[in-house]
Every structure is written in structure tokens, then in C-alpha cells.
Image (cartoon, rainbow, N blue to C red):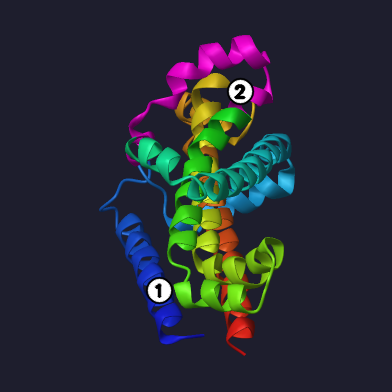
Amino acid sequence: MSWAGWLRLIVVGGAVLLLEVLCRAGVIAKTVLPAPSVMAGDLYRLLASGAASADIGETLGNVAMAVIASILLGFVAGVAIHAMPRVRRALDPFLATYYAVPFFVFYPVLIVIFGLGAAPIVVIGTLFGVVAMLINTLNGLDRIPRVLLKTARVHGMDPVRTALMVKLPSAAPFLFTGAKLAIAYCFIGVIAAEFIMSSSGIGYSIAYAFNNFDNSRMYALMLFIIVLVTVLNAVLFTWERRIMQRRRR
């Protein structure tokens, strides 16, 4: 592990330890925030009992569909927009202000179009993640060294080979960044949608626990989300680093 990785572990571990001490010392009331060790125990018992399995499975399924849709649509749209400079100049102001749009106001319209169920929630998750992937695709394509493109033309490479052997490898760091952001935004969109628009899922379960003062379940599910997203980001980071190392060789 690099020094940066150790530094991150020290910072996170120190914050968790400080929170544990403050909670155990009574500085933070347990009715407000339980100690991290208590949250971990509650999460273990919740997962072992299977009481949240259905909600977790539904949310992860919705997030998976939203992530796949946002990454594919964002990548394809980014490539298409990059190939049309005039269209890009027209869309740039909208992309810059995209996340100022309150997507949840469109939920009634989405219900009319898609009906009740998971579809509107997946669409909202996709709307949250797609532009992060699109923007990073554009940034990656913008930063491909021109000398590489000229070299590809000199060697008579066709557009497909140029895209696969030159453009994609050069843009890979930005594409990975876009994918990581898309995953994070899709989690935010899906779980936030479940808070107010669903009768099942992790978001609904957290909101229900909050309304019924069930702190142990609420914080256990929140901890589950934090751990899950952290692990996913760590896996993507490791995968990205290995691909970059192979490319340098």
C-alpha cells in the first residue's frame, strides 16, 4: 500500500476512534448517535437475521440498473457530442448547470410514463449519474495527445482501431473517474428517491426507522451504505491502478 493509502486509513481510523471515544464518554448522547462499535454490532445482527435482505436486494438491483444505464448512455453521448463541436458548444451551459435541476419534481411525470414501481427510481438514479460519466468522457477525449492521433493516421489506422488502441487507453483515467462518480451519484439518486417515493428499499427502510425512532436500524443501514460504497470505490481504484500499470509496461 502506498503512503497515500496509509494516510487515508490513518485519517479514517482516527475519525472513527475519536467518534467512539466521544460517544462512550457521553459527550455525544447515545440517543443522538450510537458509537461506531455499536453500529457495527447492530449491522451484523441485522444482516444475520435477514430482516433487511429484501430491502438491500431491491436497492442494489435498482442501483445496478441505474449504474449500467448511466455509464453506457454517458459514454455514448460523450463520444457523440465530442464529435460534434457545434452541438457541444450549445450544450455546455446546460451541462454546467445540470446538477442544479431538482430531479424529484419530475417524479409525477415519470410515474405517468413508467408507472409505479422501480422504473421511476431507476430513471432518477440514471439522471443523477449519466452526466458525470458524460462530462468525464468529454474531458478524457479532449486530453488525448494530438501526437498519438497523428501517429495513428501516419500508420494508416482506421477509426475503429484508432478508437480501441489510442483513444480509449488515453482516456481511460477519465473514464474510470466518470464511472466512480456515476456509481456514487446513482446510489444518491436511488436511495434519495426511495426515501420519499417508495414503500421498500434501503432508503424507505431508513426513513421508516427515523420516523419510528429506531436508531439502531437506521444507523446500521447507513453504515452498510458507507461500507459498501467505500469497498466499491476501493475495488475500482485497484482495478484502475492495475490497468494503468499494465499500460505503462
* Residue carrying label 1: 8
Q: Residue at x 40, y 37 (%)?
A: 91
Q: Residue at x 56, y 55 (%)?
A: 179
Q: Are marks 2 and 1 in contact (CB under 8 Å)?
A: no
Tell me where residue 111 appears, x and y as whole percent.
60, 13
Tell me where residue 3 appears, x and y as whole percent.
41, 86
Specify start and end residues of the magenta stretch as a single range. Answer: 94-121
Q: Is residue 38 visible?
A: no
- Considering the whole magenta stretch, tell me its main secondary structure: helix
Give the structural element (helix, strand or loop) at label 2.
helix
In the image, residue 118 lies in the stretch drawn in magenta: yes
Q: Amino acid at mark 2?
A: Pro
* Residue carrying label 2: 120
Q: Residue at x 52, y 17 (%)?
A: 107
Q: Amino acid at mark 1?
A: Arg
What is the number of the mark on residue 205?
Answer: none
Q: How many labels were placed on the picture?
A: 2
User: On screen, 241 above or below 188?
Assistant: below
Please state which of the two labelled residues, at mark 2 or mark 1, is closer to the viewer.
2
Horizontally, is 104 left or right of 175 in the view?
left
